[in-house]
Amino acid sequence: MQVLATRRYPGPAFAELPDVEVLPLAALEEPRPGVGGLIAANEPVPFDLLPGLRIVANYGVGYDRVDAAECARRGIVVTNTPGVLDAATADLAFALVLAARRRVVEGDRLVRSGGWVGSWAEDSLLAEELAGSTLGIVGLGRIGSAVARRAQGFELRVLYTQRHDVETELGEYRELDALLSESDVVTLHVPRTAETIGLLDARRLALLRDGTCLVNTARGDIVDEAALLAELVSGRIRAGLDVFAHEPSVPPELLGLPNVVLTPHLGSGTRQTREAMTRLVVDNVLALERGEPPLTPVP
Ligand code: DGY
């Protein structure tokens, strides 16, 4: 089966594809009826240019930009990469919690600018303690649970929301509004769906207490970006943001704010995780070629 990959995905597994062409979708000009497999990183599928598709193997767990309903209608299998990126994403969420709450980036800027001239005992960068505070996890799925396990080591009280009613030792269940108003730190781990776009709107953001730190490693438009900007510009809350509504564009107003830490969608960005994602993508394609069921079809 001819496979088109939108980039050379990292790791040795990529070389196991017997017939693969690396080409960004933007460079695809003519229909390619011979292509049966598409490997892409949450990119819209050009169905007209790839009429022979049998599988879209999504490099990533989130596939919100792949029209899975249209794929199903056309008999195209869609797979994603669940599980292998939980630890890396949970680690990055924690890095942002620590960086935003403990003012790490502000401190870094102060040192680099030569502005650190006094004693450590002055309190210009005093932060709020993390231990003993309350972490609200919006979406206790695979990644949210990995965050909750890390939270135990940091001595946090954990609250969580969850789609399905599952008993867990990892924290206490709350309705979303209650979680937002009770937490010192809120971290988002829901997929982007019709129900979660704009989930944290202006009303819900106003429920956050003064000084709360909001971390988003999920999808940018789960939060109303304009309302979030207003809260951040006012200085009422802090944030650690790895995702944005219109990536790679970042609202320019964010760039000068001291109370925000920004990263460029790095959640799964470790070599080990990205190589494991490639492994799973390739295994899904090879399984289909052998006539076997895909390993991780999307629900
Ligand atoms: C995903 O897998 O959906 C992530 O956003 C990539 O890190």
Image (cartoon, rainbow, N blue to C red):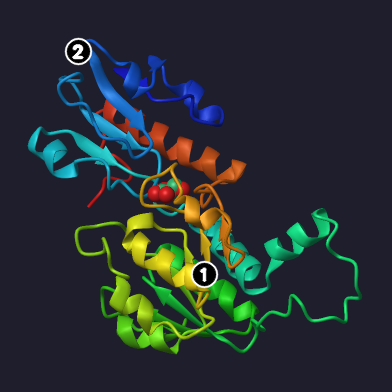
Which quadrant, please, contains the N terminus? top left
**Viewer-proximal residue, 209 or 174?**
209
Given the image, on which type of amino acid does mark 2 rest?
Pro
Q: Would you name the residue on which mark 2 appears?
A: 31
Write the residue at 19% across / 12% down: 31
Instruction: Say few, some or many: other residues with alpha carbon within 10 Å of mark 2 (under 14 / 14 to 19 / 20 or more).
Output: some
Say which element carries label 2: loop
**Viewer-proximal residue, 158 or 19?**
158
Which of the two marks, 2 or 1, is nearer to us in this view? 2
Given the image, on which type of amino acid does mark 1 rest?
Val
Write the residue at 19% across / 43% down: 68
Q: CA distance from mark 2 to mark 1?
A: 44 Å
Q: Would you name the residue on which mark 1 appears?
A: 147
Tell me where residue 101 appears, x and y as whole percent.
62, 74
Say which element carries label 1: helix
From what the image shows, is residue 143 above or below residue 31? below
Residue 173 visible from this viewpoint:
no
| Horizontal side of residue 63 vs 20, given as left or right | left
Instruction: Say few, some or many: other residues with alpha carbon within 10 Å of mark 1 (under 14 / 14 to 19 / 20 or more).
Output: many
Tell me where residue 61 appears, x and y as whole percent.
37, 49
| Horizontal side of residue 55 vs 169, given as left or right | left
Write the residue at 64% across / 70% down: 98
Tell me where residue 288 appears, x and y as whole percent.
27, 30
**Viewer-proximal residue, 162 or 294?**
162
